[in-house]
Image (cartoon, coloured by chain):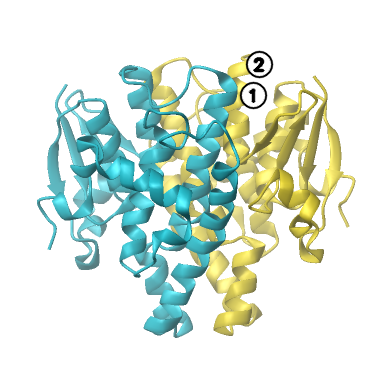
Chain colours: A cyan, B yellow
Amino acid sequence: MTLVLHNFFRSSTSTRLRAALNLKGLAYDYVPYVLRRGDTRRPDYLANNPAGLVPTLERDDGVVMTQSLAIIEWLEETHPEPALLPTDADGRARVRSLAYMIACEIHPLNNLRVLGYLAEMLGADETAQKEWFNHWVSTTFDALETTISRDAQTGAYCHGDAPGLADTCLYAQVWNNRRFEIETATWPTIAGIFERLDALPAFRDAAPPNQPDAA
Amino acid sequence: MTLVLHNFFRSSTSTRLRAALNLKGLAYDYVPYVLRRGDTRRPDYLANNPAGLVPTLERDDGVVMTQSLAIIEWLEETHPEPALLPTDADGRARVRSLAYMIACEIHPLNNLRVLGYLAEMLGADETAQKEWFNHWVSTTFDALETTISRDAQTGAYCHGDAPGLADTCLYAQVWNNRRFEIETATWPTIAGIFERLDALPAFRDAAPPNQPDAA
């Protein structure tokens, strides 16, 4: 199956999905979009993804997929090996919960479009935007650090010693944090997991600076 | 299995989970929290849910679950009937994508704690908060309406003629919108689905005004 990934190097939802595709050993054509230029607001993009968000995954059977976590769950169901979720229901719930802490509590608040709204509509200057970004990262990373540091189910990665769904979100979020110079060392368990992920080619190859459209 | 649901009547993540529990026919003990009073910031609550968010689902085997969508996926895996996700991988991806549009693009931005930050840190008055709330609802509901209205897979509900995961999110979000007097009629497909869901006891019994802690 030929896969076309419509995405942006710095987008953390794109980074998540690239890591998952790499872990599954699936090749894809990389089509970059410049978000600030409004590339994803063009009619041809909106026809496939009415929300105008990245990533979009286009398949050669004509199916167009949106929402990074929905696509990763689909990858898991259609290409089970290597597994990104544990086999037991409790483990799966734990991994999804960790993933959603990042995907539902941090990322949506720190999107480019949200920072744009803060600036344009609420007069937030660069300092205020940085405080906002930091606030939501810290709020959830504090809770995530507590959650994973005290739980024996945490291993080299978020859940045991194989990387999975939660790790794709953690890895992408730490990269995103760097745009605002957030020091991951504040959260030692998260920092350790990130370093180990960053040593894996599947993750390293998904990192923002290693994409064709990186500045 | 005895289930204890720690939640808040008006919380849309709580509403989602109540609807899913009701659809699965699972009874639960209802423990209400007053978010504005800081009930979920108390040490005993944070011990179970370090993020201080609702809902938390406590099981009699000692397992404590967080993140509404992770809990709903667990319900689906452990209590498969009636199904909240289709059986085919493409259908499952579609339903999850619709659910995440709401759960990842609207709800996180319109939380009580986010509105509080806007007021305290960025001086957003009630009008500015309402504009913010409306903006993120409209942005994603416009895209959601386009997505579901043009797709033959949409039926009486978001996917076919049985309610599922995406419907729990849609139903909860429309209730949430009412706090800011957003007229759902702007989005006719969404409005129709909501009305049909609201006629089902599983959803109606999950609605904010029908909870024991409703004002």
- The circle on residue A87 is none
The residue under the point 40% across, 85% down is A125
Percent x, y of residue A34 = 18, 60
Where A15 falls versus B177 (above or below)?
above
Percent x, y of residue A116 = 37, 73
Report the label total: 2
Residue A55 visible within the image: no
Q: What SS does tag 2 mark? A: loop
Quadrant housing residue A167: top left
Q: Which residue is mark 2?
A: B79
Circles 2, 1 touching at the beta carbon (< 8 Å): yes
Nearest the eye: B58 or A41: B58
Residue neighbourhood size for the residue with mark 1, other residues' Cα within 10 Å, grouped as few (<14), some (14–19), many (≥20): many
Quadrant housing residue B26: top right
Residue B113 visible within the image: yes
Nearest the eye: A99 or B105: A99
Percent x, y of residue B155 = 51, 27
User: Mark 1 — on which chain does it sit?
Assistant: B
The residue under the point 31% across, 35% down is A65
Distance from Cα at disc 2 to Cα at disc 1: 5 Å
Q: What SS does tag 1 mark? A: helix
Percent x, y of residue A159 = 47, 32
The residue under the point 76% across, 55% down is B40
User: Mark 2 — on which chain does it sit?
Assistant: B
The amino acid type found where label 2 is placed reads His
- The circle on residue B75 is 1
